[in-house]
Image (cartoon, rainbow, N blue to C red):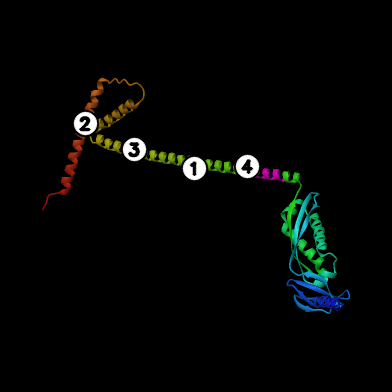
Amino acid sequence: MPLVFALILVVVAVIVLVKLVRIVPQGYEWTVERFGKYVATLDPGLHFLIPFIYAIGRKVNMMEQVLDVASQDVITRDNAVVKVDGVVFYQVLDAAKAAYEVANLELAVINLVMTNIRTVLGSLDLDESLSKRDEINTRLLRVVDEATHPWGLKITRIELKDIQPPRDLVDSMARQMKAEREKRANILEAEGFRQAAILKAEGEKQSVILAAEGKREAAFREAEARERLGAADAKATELVSVAIAQGDVNALNYFVAIKYIEALKVFGDSPNQKTMLLPMEATGVLGALAGITDLVRTAQSESSARKAVAAGPRP
């Protein structure tokens, strides 16, 4: 009996010691209950509690945690059904509220997020649901954080992992995207043809302008040449007229011979078959040529005489 009594005392002492000394690990907070009522919260570290009066109520994880939101069907504003899933990051700030304000904390958070996902996506069109994911995440975070504040939680982040539209809508969007790419390709190709046509027309325009400028310049120079040639002929005619007036018959022969030679040149340059019959008077042309030589000699003699007279006798 004494041995059994000693064993009982040892067991009781161990139980009392276990209930007396409490060590809370880092990242957790434990609630303390006195006869089933919450009275305090134990921080990480060593604590002592009076056994059988005070007891540990809930062991609350104070680290940031993540919850997976299961995939669910959501109807958008334009009656498109999409499958949506996501993740929620939250942290307990008040262990007592998290332990006693809600029965099942994780289940409550998940159901709250799923409900608000249906609410937010139901107010958007399909295109907006697919393109405005950041805006959806922000709205969800604001609404859920306000709803969970009485539970002593801080919702740090909500992310939609995937939004899957129906297969027929995916195929329709793919066809629409393909048609849009083909449209842009056709527009770019037409724009290329248009630019090529504009450049070609501009080049032809410049070519015509340059050709017209060239013809204009050639006509101007040709007219100038004819003008100079006419002036030379007029000057020659004047000189010949003066020589004839002074009784110089060789000048007349020179004038006639020049015109005769020019006529023969034109006749010789014509593309037609050429047969030339010269009259007996053609020998007069030879005489005219001889007169040209005499005229040149006379002109040279007169020029020498004028230079001698101009020089005068030397003193």
Going from N to C along the chain, the mark reached first, 4 or 1, is: 4
CA gap, disc 3 to disc 4?
63 Å
CA gap, disc 2 to disc 3?
24 Å
Q: Secondary structure at mark 2?
A: helix
The residue that disc 2 covers is 291
CA gap, disc 4 to disc 1?
30 Å
Number of the front mark, 2 or 3 = 3
> The magenta stretch spans which residues?
173-182
Q: Amino acid at mark 1?
A: Gln
Q: Amino acid at mark 4?
A: Asn
- Residue 9 image offset from top left, x and y in percent: 84, 78
Residue 178 counted in the magenta span = yes
The residue that disc 4 covers is 186
The reply to whether the C-beta atoms of the residues labelled 4 and 2 are less than 8 Å apart is no
The residue that disc 3 covers is 229
Which residue sits at x=50%, y=42%? 203
The residue that disc 1 covers is 206
CA gap, disc 4 to disc 2?
85 Å
Q: Amino acid at mark 3?
A: Leu
Going from N to C along the chain, the mark reached first, 3 or 4, is: 4
| Total numbered labels | 4
Residue 101 counted in the magenta span = no
Q: Secondary structure at mark 4?
A: helix
- Residue 163 image offset from top left, x and y in percent: 74, 53
Which residue sits at x=36%, y=39%? 225
Going from N to C along the chain, the mark reached first, 4 or 2, is: 4
CA gap, disc 3 to disc 1?
34 Å
Q: Which of the image's four quarters has the N terminus?
A: bottom right
